[in-house]
Image (tube, rainbow, N blue to C red):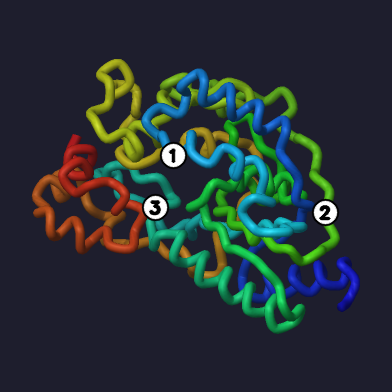
C-alpha cells in the first residue's frame, strides 16, 4: 500500500474535486481536555433540554469507540454562504442562513459517500464511517485538530480567509493517513461576537445554550421564556448574529457548488403569510429542509410573532 502522505494527498484532491472547500486529517486520540470541558458544560446544565448530549460520553470523546481500530479522522468543510442576490425580504421572519435551502445532512452525506467510494476503490479493504452532525462526534474539535481552522470565541470554527459560514463533516477510518497540524487562534482581543449577542449567551470560547437564540427557536420544545423572548431581535429560526459581526467573515465568499441554493419562495414569505399557511402546507414547504426540525404548529407560532 502507498505511504500515508500519498494516501492523504489523493483523498484531499478527490475531496476538492467533489466540491468540498477544504479537507484536513487528524490522528485519532482521546480528547482529554475536551472531555473535561464537556463534563463541566453538562454538569452546569448549559445544554438545556438537549439530553442527547449526555449520551455516549465515551464515544463522543474517543472516536476509536465508533470505528474499530480507527486511526484517522478526515474532516471536511462545505461553504454555505449564499450569493448576494439571495436574501430575505424585510417582512420575512428571520431564518438562519444555514436553513435557507435543502437540509445539509442529505447533501453532505451524498457527497461523503462519493468520497468513501473513492477511498474503497483506491485503498482496498478499509473500515470507515461517515458522520454529518448526527452522531456523538465533536466535529468542530476534529476540524480544528485537522488544521481547518480554530474555534472562535463564539464557539464556531473559523478558517482564515474563509470565515465561518460552512458545514463540517467527518470520515473516521482505520486507514493510516498523514495528519495535519492545528492552526493558531486568530481571535486576538476581539469580542464583537460576545458584545453583539442580545441574550448574553456567550463568554470567550464558551456558550450557554439555554440562552442562545438558535436553541430557543429550534431545540426548545416549550415556549421561550418571556425574559429571553423579548431579546430575540426578530430571529424566528436560528440566529446568525455572532457570525454576522465576526471580522473574519468579511473575507468570506459565496459558495460556488449550488449545493445549498436557497428556497426563494420561503425567503419571500412574510409573517402574515406564515400565519395563513395550513399545517399540511408547512410540511410540504419544509420537507427536506432544516425547518422541518420544528413541528408545523410551533413553527407557525414562531414565524407569526
The tag on residue 40 is none
Location of the C terminus by quadrant is top left
Give the residue at the far top of this rendering: 227
How crowded is the residue under tag 1: few (<14 C-alpha within 10 Å), some, or many (20+)? Answer: few
Q: Residue 23 placed where, x, y %?
A: 71, 61
Secondary structure at badge 1 equals helix
Badge 3 element: helix
The image quadrant where one finds the N terminus is: bottom right
Compute the Cα span from label 2 to label 1: 30 Å
Tell me if mark 3 has few (under 14), some (14-19) or many (20+) residues whose alpha carbon lies within 10 angstroms of its own: many
| Residue 162 spot, x, y in % from top left | 66, 51
Q: Can residue 169 be seen in this view?
A: yes
Verify CB contact (< 8 Å) between mark 2 and mark 1: no
Which residue, given by chain and number where applicable, does mark 1 sit on? 52
Q: Which residue is drawn at 70% across and 63% down?
A: 173
Q: In this view, does 200 lie above or below 137?
A: above
| Residue 234 in the image, given as x and y percentages of width and height | 31, 33
For marks 2 and 1 on the same chain, the one whose residue lies earlier in the sequence? 1
> What residue did someone put label 2 on?
180
Tag 2 secondary structure: loop
The earlier-in-sequence mark between 2 and 3 is: 3
Side of 95 relative to 16 (left or right): left
| Viewer-nearest residue: 113 or 82 | 113
Q: Residue furthest bottom?
A: 121
Residue corresponding to mark 3:
99
Q: Kindly report the distance in space between the C-alpha atoms of the residues bearing marks 1 and 3.
A: 22 Å
Q: Residues within 10 Å of mark 2 (few under 14, many from 20)?
A: some
The residue at 82%/63% (across/down) is 177
Amino acid at each position: 500500500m502507498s505511504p500515508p502522505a500519498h494516501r492523504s494527498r489523493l483523498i484531499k484532491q478527490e475531496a476538492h474535486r467533489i466540491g468540498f472547500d477544504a479537507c484536513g486529517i487528524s490522528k485519532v486520540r482521546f480528547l482529554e481536555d475536551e472531555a473535561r470541558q464537556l463534563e463541566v458544560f453538562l454538569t452546569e446544565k448549559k445544554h438545556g433540554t438537549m439530553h442527547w448530549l449526555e449520551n455516549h460520553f465515551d464515544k463522543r470523546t474517543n472516536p476509536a469507540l465508533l470505528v474499530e481500530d480507527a486511526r484517522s479522522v478526515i474532516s471536511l468543510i462545505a461553504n454555505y454562504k449564499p450569493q448576494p442576490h439571495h436574501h430575505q425580504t424585510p417582512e420575512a421572519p428571520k431564518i438562519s442562513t444555514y436553513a435557507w435551502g435543502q437540509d445539509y445532512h442529505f447533501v453532505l452525506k451524498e457527497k461523503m459517500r462519493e468520497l468513501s467510494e473513492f477511498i474503497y476503490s483506491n485503498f482496498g479493504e478499509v473500515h470507515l464511517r461517515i458522520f454529518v452532525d448526527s452522531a456523538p462526534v465533536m466535529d468542530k474539535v476534529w476540524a480544528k485538530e485537522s488544521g481547518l481552522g480554530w474555534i472562535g470565541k463564539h464557539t464556531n470554527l473559523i478558517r482564515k480567509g474563509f470565515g465561518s459560514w460552512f458545514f463540517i463533516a467527518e470520515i473516521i477510518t482505520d486507514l493510516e493517513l498523514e495528519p495535519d497540524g492545528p492552526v493558531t487562534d486568530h481571535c486576538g482581543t476581539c469580542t464583537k461576537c460576545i458584545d453583539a449577542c442580545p441574550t448574553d449567551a456567550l463568554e470567550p470560547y464558551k456558550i450557554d445554550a439555554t440562552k442562545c437564540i438558535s436553541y430557543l427557536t429550534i431545540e426548545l420544545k416549550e415556549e421561550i421564556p418571556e425574559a429571553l423572548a423579548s431579546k430575540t431581535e426578530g430571529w424566528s429560526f436560528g440566529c446568525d448574529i455572532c457570525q454576522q459581526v465576526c471580522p473574519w467573515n468579511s473575507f468570506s465568499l459565496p459558495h460556488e457548488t449550488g449545493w445549498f441554493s436557497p428556497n426563494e419562495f420561503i425567503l419571500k414569505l412574510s409573517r402574515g403569510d406564515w400565519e395563513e399557511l395550513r399545517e399540511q402546507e408547512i410540511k410540504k414547504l419544509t420537507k427536506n429542509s432544516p425547518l422541518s426540525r420544528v413541528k408545523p404548529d410551533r413553527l407557525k407560532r414562531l414565524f407569526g410573532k
